[in-house]
Amino acid sequence: MNLTLNVWRQESPREDGRFERYEANDISPDMSFLEMLDVVNERLTESGDDPIAFDHDCREGICGMCGMMINGRAHGPVDHTTVCQLHMRVFEDGEELWLEPWRAEGFPIVKDLAVDRQAFDRIVAAGGYISVRTGQAPDASAVLVPKENSDLAFDAAACISCGACVAACPNASAMLFTAAKASHLNLLPQGQPERVSRTQGMVAAMEEERFGHCTNHGACQNACPKGISVDYIAMLNRDLWKAARHRPGDLG
């Protein structure tokens, strides 16, 4: 199959960017999207041109590094799919594609399609740690956890920190990411001692990183490759409100 790519090229954060047009010919429909970009880059290198910079690591839909906008959609046209798991067969032969990096003040562009996502690391770090001593692995029934809570915590922990929620949000809000990272600990018994400080610290860090505010558009949920629900934002807001008026036992 043959495709036309309009790729955002930007040499550094301090320089202006622009779209450049490339022809991706003889592409196998069984390739992943990143494999297609590898082929394009090989041809650019062979012709003496600068290859397209993009983030990637595991290529298994786990690490979240591969995120980019494809035709205006975070991670492309297939729901619950990362770019590295997106196959070329979902596109039509002769189709024209537009590739852009995440657009958010909290994600400064490093080069081309690659952005700096260290802001997410700082938000997680602001949540602190769990002070409960774990020691050796306890018996499975030593700490009772309601199944509803364990299921919710497991779903929240599925967040791969890709940033699609920020990229899709018209406000560039990081609320879904922050809510997922806070909730998967706040829902479990081991996370209770630091629940107040974790909630307040992570939200404060999110605001310091200049991400926007949530106005309940729901675009974050639709863009999330792991299908994380906006219900976690409601949980975070509830915990934040309780933390503001915290007395012992309020968050139980």
Image (cartoon, rainbow, N blue to C red):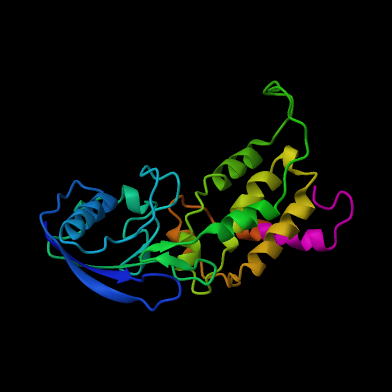
- Image side of residue 151 versus residue 94, left or right: right
- Image side of residue 207 versus residue 14, left or right: right
- Which sits in the foreground, 31 or 192? 31
- Which sits in the foreground, 41 or 161? 41
Residue at the location (70% across, 47% down)? 186
- Which sits in the foreground, 146 or 103? 103
In the displayed structure, 47 sits above or below 38; it is: below
- Residue 47 on the magenta segment: no
Q: Is residue 231 visible?
A: no
Residue at the location (32% across, 70% down)? 9
- Across and down, in percent, residue 228 comes to 51, 53
Total labels drawn: 0
State the quadrant of the N terminus. bottom left
Outermost residue toward the bottom in this view: 16
Residue at the location (62% across, 67% down)? 209
Q: Is residue 209 visible?
A: yes
- Residue 239 on the magenta segment: yes
- Across and down, in percent, residue 248 comes to 89, 50
Stretch of the chain drawn in magenta? 236-252
- Image side of residue 1 versus residue 14, left or right: left
- Image side of residue 70 versus residue 106, left or right: left
Residue at the location (19% across, 60% down)? 44
